[in-house]
Image (spheres, rainbow, N blue to C red):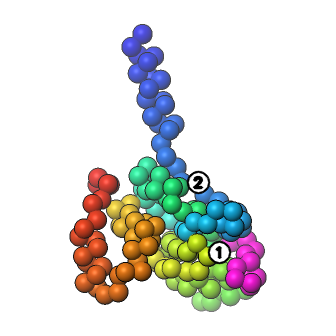
Amino acid sequence: MKKPILLLFLLTVFLSKAQVKWMTFSEAMEAQKNQPKKILIDFYADWCKPCKTMDKNTYGNSIIAKYINDNFYAVKFKADGDEKINYLGKEFSKTNNETNNKKALNDFTVFMNVSSIPSTVFLDEKSYPITNLNGYLTAKELEVYLNMIASNDYKKIKTKADWEDYTKKLQSKIKE
């Protein structure tokens, strides 16, 4: 009798693990019209190993996933994909911008100043860029930015000393 109950409990815990609720850019822009929220865009590529690691270890962290779902519209955007985007009155798609044998990026990726994959871009409630974080981030590293941006504290940070004070005061919920 104890084994089936334990098995049911473990299965429930495993299945209830928080996951980021990803959407397309168009879906996020539409949702923002009805209920304004900041947008987090994860620029990734299928060939990118750090992207897969970040998906598993950073976005797969239940604390990070819950925080993102509660405070942001989360967008997965394939940096070298063919998706057509309408943003700030401009149309973006994939054009032949291939250089030095690098894979061609979607023009939206270039417009958002994404210089490495993975990258995380934050937009405010009016869809204007807040910041761009290029490269792989651990859950603990991303947590600082999520808190700072969701709370609008980024507007108060003007110097390196402000940043250092902010990060010292933040109590991480993530155990590494």
Task: Give above or below for 38 relative to 158.
Answer: above
Q: Quick one: SS at disc 2?
A: loop
Q: Is residue 84 magenta?
A: yes
Tell me whether the residue at label 1 lies in contact with that at label 2, contact meaning CB atoms closer than 8 angstroms. Answer: no
**Residue at horizontal 60%, vertical 89%?**
100
Query: At 28% across and 85% down in the image, what residue appears?
Result: 160
In the shown orientation, is residue 107 left or right of residue 9?
Answer: right
* Residue 44 visible in image: no
Secondary structure beneath label 1: loop
Residue 12 visible at all = yes
Residue in view at x 64 percent, y 62 percent: 35
The amino acid on which the numbered mark 2 sits, given as a three-letter code, is Lys
Q: Which residues are magenta?
A: 80-94
Between residues 137 and 152, which one lies in front from this camera angle? 152
First of labels 1, 2 by sequence position: 2
Instruction: Determine the main secondary structure of the stretch shown in magenta.
Output: loop
Magenta-span inclusion, residue 97: no
Mark 1 vs mark 2, CA separation in Å: 22 Å
The residue carrying mark 1 is 80
The image's mark for residue 21 is: 2
Q: Residue at x 65, y 66 (%)?
A: 32
